[in-house]
């Protein structure tokens, strides 16, 4: 069979590879000048490709809608992904929180495994329309003309980072042929705050981060925090951003629980500067009336513990979806066969990757979902 894969990200590349290994004639159609652009950007170009958790633990870090992919993940989940790259001379090594990276620390090595020399490509080619007759795709219209195939796999990604090709066009294509698209929201995203600009460029390591909604703690994570021109970012903030997005209609704030220090004697400023950047401490304590801790009352020490060692930042919004790392929402899973990734509406169409209404947390989860659904789409044609 002739297979056209629309989208050259991790899901599309895996689908193309598996379809080719089954003996099909495969061509990848992609709007960019090269394949795998977003993949090369992940993990600061190191590519956190999967998360080595047992499947049930893995699923706890994903959206409820991701249960749709349980069958696919059972066949090609984290353990199989690790084995797959090991077998292709790209060994993976563990880091904290069960994250798996290529031993080389190079995303290019992950991409090279997914590329298949005998798979044809049509680059700089944007799909503009799916031409349907009797619930079957007869051809696709692109900016360069029409293309035909026996079967089509759509893996166009989400709506985040459009410069990488994930511009949301796949949603429009699928909606035009009857598929339901759930609400699209950017997650794994930076948070806007009005009182962080003096700290721009500073980062804090392994901070306990609490999301407060109406001053009640909703979730807690530990991770790195980066202060930016717009507010807060960094791996720890990306982890909790989905909770923030879900509650933005209410007053939301982020509290950073700093390392506790001995408040019996000495200088609070010196103690904190031994742990944190000087500029951060100066800004943190700008309203603090410095005096030796042995001369500080128990009441004032309690204020230090509750306020100064737990700085809180009011959140006013989040970065737009185009600057988020992951899209929450997508093609409703009720429209797709979970065993094959085939559309229930269009006979010769499979759908996989981030375009689906499935997503996970930070830490290799979303790339796992892309590779797993792509594997299934390519194998089950």
Image (cartoon, rainbow, N blue to C red):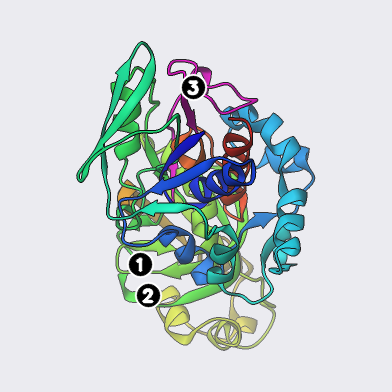
Most foreground residue, 174 or 262: 174
Label 3 environment density (alpha carbons within 10 Å; few <14, some 14–19, many ≥20): many
Closer to the chain start, of discs 2 and 3, is 2
Identify the residue under disc 1: 196
Q: Quadrant of residue 183?
A: top left
Q: What is the spatial separation of the Cα atoms under label 2 and label 1, in whole angstroms?
A: 5 Å
Q: Quadrant of residue 194?
A: bottom left
Q: Are marks 3 and 1 in contact (CB under 8 Å)?
A: no
Q: What is the spatial separation of the Cα atoms under label 2 and label 3, in whole angstroms?
A: 49 Å
Residue that extends furthest to the top in the rendered view of this protein: 134
Q: What is the spatial separation of the Cα atoms under label 3 and label 1, in whole angstroms?
A: 46 Å
Most foreground residue, 375 or 79: 375
Establish if 55 lies above or below 101: above
Residue 343: numbered disc? 3
Establish if 216 lies above or below 253: above
Q: Mark 2 or mark 3, which is nearer to you?
A: 3
List x then y, in percent, for residue 72: 67, 34
Q: How many numbered callouts?
A: 3
- In this view of the protein, can residue 108 be seen by the observer? yes
What range is drawn magenta here?
A: 326-351
Establish if 302 lies above or below 371: below
Q: Mark 3 or mark 1, which is nearer to you?
A: 3
- Secondary structure found at label 3: loop
**Residue 370 belongs to magenta span:** no
Identify the residue under disc 2: 199
Q: Are marks 2 and 1 in contact (CB under 8 Å)?
A: yes
- Secondary structure found at label 1: loop
């Amino acid at each position: 069979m002739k297979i056209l894969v629309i989208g050259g990200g991790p899901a599309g590349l895996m689908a193309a590879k598996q379809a080719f290994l089954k003996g099909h004639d495969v061509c990848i159609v992609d709007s960019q000048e090269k394949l795998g652009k977003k993949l090369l950007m992940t993990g600061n170009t190191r590519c956190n490709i999967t998360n080595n958790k047992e499947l049930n633990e893995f699923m706890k870090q994903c959206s409820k809608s991701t249960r749709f992919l349980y069958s696919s993940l059972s066949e090609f989940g984290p353990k199989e992904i690790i084995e797959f790259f090991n077998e292709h001379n790209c060994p993976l090594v563990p880091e904290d929180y069960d994250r798996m990276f290529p031993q080389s620390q190079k995303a290019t090595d992950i991409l090279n495994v997914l590329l298949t020399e005998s798979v044809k490509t049509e680059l700089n080619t944007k799909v503009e329309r799916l031409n349907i007759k009797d619930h079957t795709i007869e051809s696709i219209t692109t900016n360069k003309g029409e293309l035909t195939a026996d079967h089509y796999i759509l893996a166009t990604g989400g709506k985040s980072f459009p410069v990488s090709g994930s511009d949301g066009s796949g949603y429009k294509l699928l909606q035009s042929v009857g598929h339901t698209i759930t609400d699209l929201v950017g997650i794994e995203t930076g948070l806007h705050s009005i009182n962080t600009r003096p700290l721009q460029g500073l980062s804090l390591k392994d901070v306990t981060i609490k999301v407060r909604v109406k001053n009640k703690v909703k979730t807690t994570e530990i991770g790195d925090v980066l202060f930016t021109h717009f507010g807060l970012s960094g791996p720890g903030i990306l982890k909790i951003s989905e909770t923030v997005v879900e509650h933005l209609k209410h007053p939301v704030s982020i509290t950073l629980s700093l390392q506790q220090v001995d408040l019996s004697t000495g200088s609070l400023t010196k103690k904190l500067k031994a742990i944190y950047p000087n500029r951060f401490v100066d800004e943190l304590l700008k309203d603090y009336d410095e005096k030796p801790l042995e001369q500080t009352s128990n009441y004032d020490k309690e204020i230090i513990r509750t306020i100064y060692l737990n700085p809180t930042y009011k959140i006013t919004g989040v970065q737009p979806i185009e600057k988020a790392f992951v899209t929450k929402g997508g093609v409703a899973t009720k429209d797709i066969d979970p065993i094959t990734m085939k559309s229930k509406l269009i006979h010769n169409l499979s759908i996989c990757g981030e375009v689906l209404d499935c997503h996970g947390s930070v830490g290799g989860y979303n790339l796992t979902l892309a590779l797993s659904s792509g594997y299934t789409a390519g194998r089950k044609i």
